[in-house]
Amino acid sequence: MQNCTLNNIGDIERKNLKFALGTRVFIRRSNDVIPEILGKVPDEPEGEEIVYPEICPSCGTPLEQRGAHLFCNNRLGCKPQIVARITHFASRDAMDIETFSEKTAEQLHDELNLREPADLYTLTFDDLIKLERFGEKKANNLLQAIAESKGRDLASFLFALGIPNTGKSTTKVLADHFGSLDAVVAATVEELTSLPDIGGIVADSIVTFFADPFYQAGIRKMLEQGVSPKAPDKPAAPVTDSFFSGKTVVLTGTLQQLSRDEATERLEALGAKVTGSVSKKTDLVIAGEKAGSKLAKAQELGIPVIEDEDELIRLLNENENN
């Protein structure tokens, strides 16, 4: 076993861990999730106190503890944050800027001083052609890919923003319910928590994100550069009398015969609401290979689970043909 986790400072302190190189520890692994260090073997000698960092190892900014985690607040000057934010924004599930990579983001940061995703939309041919490994064809292809991304759908744009505690399923819920960026930005905690898959923590994260002047300025800059997230297409009326009608469904693990997006589309067409987290509101969990904590939580709550993918396909086909 090569990797296991200590979640955060609080986890280390609760377990009273003091390590020296070679210290033996107890490790637990359940449901194919990342193994967890439980504590030190009792007969092992005491090691040194674990010293927590006080400054960001990349930019030297003092770190701030918020909740269980340490954060660097230097959002416009901390290179790993900037590169990660731009890379995520351009990724396939987000704005899908073709051929863009982490190396591209790093090069644009280092050589053209890009500081945020909105800066991508200010790039010109003259900017790119002077860069190492950028010929005319590569420069034009990247500019075309960036231009094409301006019209991505609202759910992809919201996911690209990197709102804390949200994933693809949550941003799709937001896009489908509110229908426009302005409506999402104006949403209250009360409105958000009324939606499936959104609890208080996620709702607070969304409201806090859009109230932050830093992110407001970035979004405004993108809109000024022609980014125009498309409202979701009005879906066809879902089937109301299928096995899945009205059920809140969670997909977890890996399916072999369907992609996650294909399974979601077919389930929603049959009247299901597909969400990303298991709760008491969940009616059904579909578990593929290597299903982890979501499957365990469903079993704990007594929620019905489909673990046989052939059975899932049979139910989908049967209900689609009725």
Image (spheres, rainbow, N blue to C red):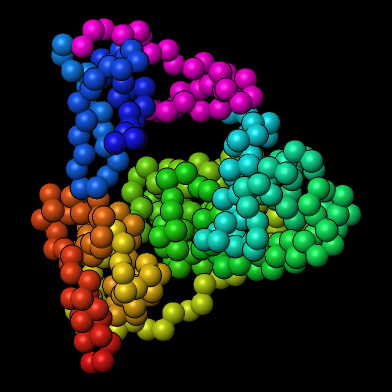
Q: Is residue 140 visible?
A: no
Examine the structure image and report whether residue 57 is included in the region drawn in magenta. Answer: yes
Residue 33, x across and y down, in percent:
27, 44
> Which residue reaches farthest bottom?
322
Quadrant of the image containing the C terminus: bottom left
| Screen quadrant of the N terminus | top left
- The vertical placement of 181 against 312, above or below, is above
Q: Is residue 187 left or right of residue 313?
A: right
Residue visible at 21% across and 11% down in the picture: 44
Q: Residue at x 20, y 54 (%)?
A: 295
Magenta segment, which residues?
Answer: 44-72
Q: Magenta span: helix, strand or loop, mainly?
A: loop
Q: Nearer the viewer, residue 190 or 19?
A: 19
Q: Examine the structure image and report whether residue 5 is included in the region drawn in magenta.
A: no
Using the rendered view, name the quadrant where residue 61 is placed: top right
Q: Quadrant of residue 97?
A: bottom right
Residue drawn 17% across the image and 54% down it: 298
Residue drawn at point x = 41 percent, y = 57 percent: 170
Residue 287 position within the rendered picture, expressed as x and y whole percent measured from the top left: 23, 62
The number of callouts visible is 0
- Residue 245 visible from this viewpoint: yes
Out of 128 and 242, give the one closest to the viewer.
128
Point out residue 182 in the picture as x, y percentages from the top left corner. Answer: 58, 59
Where's residue 107, x and y in %?
73, 44
